Image (cartoon, rainbow, N blue to C red):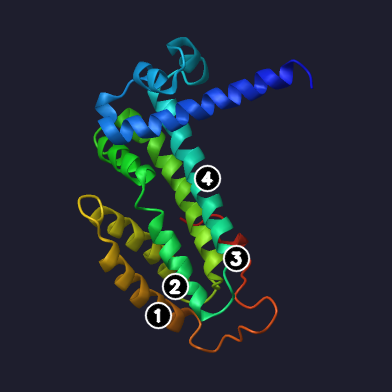
């Protein structure tokens, strides 16, 4: 291993610590209570080192949202990989998607969305970033549900699933909404199964339920 490789590894570790600290700080203090210095202290990194990686608070937050969004979707794929094919898969996938919007990442994102609605500088960072993250979440949901977006109304139902997840995430902020969310997941999954498959899908056929998702590349 060359001397450059350990240096690159240290750099990646530092970036990761800063990104994780940024998410924690925003969730706890809100946007206005967070600076690069505060995040650096939380991460155990010097302010100079933090600013070397992320010159502005906005650039650090953008990296945090993007990287952790990708990590969440990778985790979702890994968890769904072991699910059996068949109608019961839809309910399990819907539950997993909804659970993405109940953790610290979602709480931090809410803080940023609220501020970005009136802060032009932050909005300029968040709008294109959220568009990219949203498109990827949509593609992954299509992939894991195994639905065909060429069918009328399916794309809208997938997006409605993500919108439902955000709404239930909001409902879970102040009180534990787990019981009600489970009931809604069950009912939504039954409706989704009936609408997108209509009971006609032959789940025993090799590859049944798997969809090529490239057609969704430019969709929100």
Residue 90 located left or right of residue 29:
right
Q: CA distance from mark 1 to mark 3?
A: 21 Å
Pointers 3 and 4 in contact (C-beta within 8 Å): no
Question: Please, is residue 52 above or below residue 158 in the view?
Answer: above
Mark 4, residue position: 71
- Using a 10 Å C-alpha cutoff, classify the residue at mark 2 as few (fewer than 14 neighbours), some (14 to 19) or many (20 or more): many
- In the structure shown, which secondary structural element does the residue marked by tag 2 occupy? helix
The spot of residue 190 in percent (x, y) is 40, 80
Decide which of tag 1 and tag 4 comes sooner along the chain: 4
Question: Foreground: 92 or 52?
Answer: 92
Dot 2 or dot 3: first in sequence order is: 3
Secondary structure of the residue carrying tag 3 is loop
Q: Residue at x 29, y 62 (%)?
A: 178
Name the residue furthest right.
1
Disc on res. 91? 2
Image quarter (top left, top right, bottom left or bottom right) of the N terminus: top right
Of the image marks 4 and 2, the number of the one nearer the N terminus = 4
Callout 1: SS = helix
Q: Which residue is disc 3 drawn over?
A: 82
The answer to whether any part of residue 165 appears in the image is yes
Residue closest to the far left: 174
Which badge, 1 or 3, is on the more N-terminal residue? 3
């Amino acid at each position: 291993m060359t001397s450059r490789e350990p240096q690159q590894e240290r750099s990646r570790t530092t970036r990761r610590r800063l990104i994780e600290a940024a998410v924690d700080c925003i969730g706890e203090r809100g946007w206005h209570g967070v600076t690069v210095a505060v995040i650096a202290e939380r991460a155990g990194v010097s302010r100079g080192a933090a600013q070397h990686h992320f010159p502005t608070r906005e650039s650090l937050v953008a990296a945090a949202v993007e990287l952790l969004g990708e990590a969440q979707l990778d985790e979702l794929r890994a968890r769904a990989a072991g699910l059996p094919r068949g109608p019961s898969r839809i309910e399990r996938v819907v539950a997993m998607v909804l659970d993405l919007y109940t953790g610290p990442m979602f709480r931090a994102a809410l803080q940023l969305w609220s501020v970005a609605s009136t802060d032009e500088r932050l909005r300029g960072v968040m709008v294109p970033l959220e568009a990219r993250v949203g498109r990827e979440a949509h593609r992954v949901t299509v992939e894991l549900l195994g639905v065909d977006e060429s069918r009328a109304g399916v794309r809208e139902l997938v997006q409605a699933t993500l919108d439902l997840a955000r709404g239930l995430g909001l409902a879970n902020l102040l009180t534990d909404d787990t019981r009600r969310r489970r009931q809604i997941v069950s009912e939504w999954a039954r409706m989704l199964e009936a609408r997108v498959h209509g009971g006609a899908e032959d789940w025993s056929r090799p590859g049944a339920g798997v969809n090529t998702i490239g057609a969704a590349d430019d969709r929100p």
